[in-house]
Image: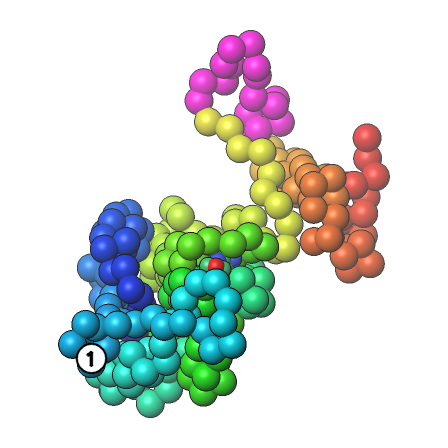
Amino acid sequence: MMKIDILTLFPEMFKGPFDVSIIKRAREKGLLDISVTNIRDFAHDKHRIVDDYPFGGGAGMVMKPEPVFAAVEFVRSRSGQESAKVVLLCPQGRVFNQEMAKDLSKEPHLILICGHYEGIDERVREKLIDEEISIGDFVLTGGELPAMVIVDAVARLIPGVLGEEESYANDSFYEGLLEYPQYTRPREFAGMKVPDILLSGDHEKIRQWRRKMSLQRTLERRPDLLKIDDLSEEDRKLLETD
Ligand code: 4H6
């Protein structure tokens, strides 16, 4: 079973996202064990202070190192795993993608640290953090939402978490391409018809149409994802026809 520890100053934020749908089912099945720990519980002064002024001056506060070190030490020893991967969610991190999600899903123990205030004492990065991850080029008030994003993306890749029906073989990015257009009933809605090919029952034609749409969409919207030189002869032909 994969263990994920989330260290945060705002544990209330995590009430909800892991208690619905696929993540809830994964936890119930015993495939995933998520714990949320309040970093403030590891501040040992009487006011339970977790932030302080930056040396050198300047605006804002910085997260103190001691409570973060103590919290990581606690969850590390509690897990009984010899190896935990410690991740800091921060704007300076490597930008998260599906490949990183796949790699993280193979780890037995993840410790996700959510920063707040203007940032975190550099000695936490130096000594404690194995990897810094950003979920995109924008600034948030804290690392909590990024942590939820990582947990969701990673959890669904753990074997057994998705059922047969939800399999990720069809996902966007599974083969490095965007998804093809999907339709369900009714066959006509607001004057818009489902493409005839999808009703034809010709599975080979349908496969080709979907592949072609995936390729076209990727070329139009995310050319950065498409390595033209790596395309098969069939893919090139599909892209060329009308
Ligand atoms: C660590 C260090 C992640 C965490 C600094 C976190 C965006 C992302 C944070 C900060 C985050 C992302 C505090 C610096 C607020 C800016 C929390 N923002 N910040 N893109 N913020 O994944 O000020």
Query: Which quadrant of the figure contains the N terminus?
Result: bottom left
Which quadrant holds residue 4?
Answer: bottom left
Q: Which residue is mark 1?
A: 45
On the rendered structure, is 185 left or right of 21? right
Determine if the magenta segment contains residue 200. Answer: yes
Q: Residue furthest left?
A: 46
Q: Magenta span covers which residues?
A: 185-201
| Residue beneath the point at 60% across and 38% down | 180
Residue 236 is left or right of residue 38, and the answer is: right
Q: Where is residue 51 shown, x and y percent of the image?
A: 34, 71
- Position of 115 relative to 219 (above/below): below
Q: In the figure, is residue 55 to the left or right of 27?
A: right
Q: Residue at x 25, y 87 (%)?
A: 77
Q: Amino acid at mark 1?
A: Asp
Q: Residue at x 80, y 54 (%)?
A: 228
**Local crowd at mark 1 within 10 Å, few (<14), some, or many (≥20)?**
few
| Residue 164 picture location, percent across and down | 38, 51
Residue projecting furthest to the top: 191
Q: Is residue 237 magenta?
A: no
**From this viewpoint, which residue is outermost toward the front?**
57
Hey, which quadrant is residue 196 in on the image? top right
**Res. 53 in view:** yes
Location of residue 16 in the rendering, given as x and y in whole percent from the top left corner: 24, 49
